[in-house]
Amino acid sequence: MIMIMKYDIYSLGIMVAVISFLGFSLENLWLSLTKGFIDNRNMNAPFLMGYGLLVVGMYLLLGTPENMALAEMVPVDRSKGEKFFVYFLCAFAVVTVGELILGHLMEKICGIQYWNYNWIPLHITQYTSIPTSIGFAAIITSFMGACFDPIMSVITMIPAQEAKSASIILMLIMSTDLIASFSKMHRTRSLNTKWQIQTRRSHLKTT
């Protein structure tokens, strides 16, 4: 079994899927609150793989707030609050840079505006803003501090062979969907909206 830090690779693969689903749900919650609808978020399956890869990638790079892999950044004698603050700053930087890169890549490669934060105060270009970066960084830091290890402890209870099969299947579903959806957006130069449900009134729109 391939171990990465204290978890095996297949358990981390399942965690990627869990976080990808949570990311899909979080984006739709944001859409519902700000625009009054939810949709498929340009995917076919209810997973946004970028979230899963980002958060698990941060775990591999930084660990968790209380057990940071880059221990020299926060000596062990530092308070819990100091450790969480440093982790928050790292998450803030990753989110800000990540949104800028992804937004500009989508515009350059697919010719579409994936999202637009121009309406948000303190935006930095249309693809990132101080408030959204603070919000995402706070969510990531809280999740990594309070939820990551407990969820992983449940995942690692799955028998090894079943966990391997589930991880491989989930990663195949997500990666295939990601490639197919982005290929379609590149080809059509438009968003891959398959369905949209208004949450402020009972109405279903399909495309």
Image: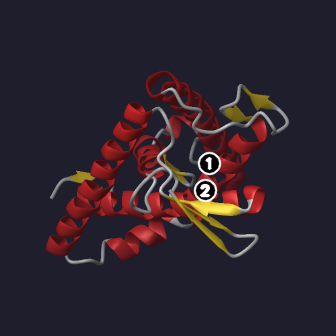
Q: Nearer the viewer, residue 31 or 142?
A: 31
The residue tagged 2 is 27
User: Residue at position x 31%, y 72% from top?
Assistant: 156
Percent across and percent down for residue 180 are 31, 45
Q: Amino acid at mark 1?
A: Asp
**In-image side of 50 versus 31 (left or right):** left
The answer to which of marks 2 and 1 sits earlier in the sequence is 2
Q: Secondary structure at mark 1?
A: loop
Secondary element at tag 2: helix
Q: Quadrant of the N terminus?
A: bottom left
Residue 187, image x and y in percent? Answer: 37, 32
What's the residue at 53%, 57% (across, down)? 23
Circle 1 residues within 10 Å: few <14, some 14–19, many ≥20:
few
- Residue identifier under label 1: 77
| Residues at circles 2 and 1 in contact by the CB criterion of under 8 Å | no
Q: Position of residue 63 (x, y in %)?
A: 46, 49
What number is the disc on residue 23?
A: none
Name, please, the residue furthest toward the right.
Answer: 121
Q: How many marks?
A: 2
Quarter assignment of residue 98: top right
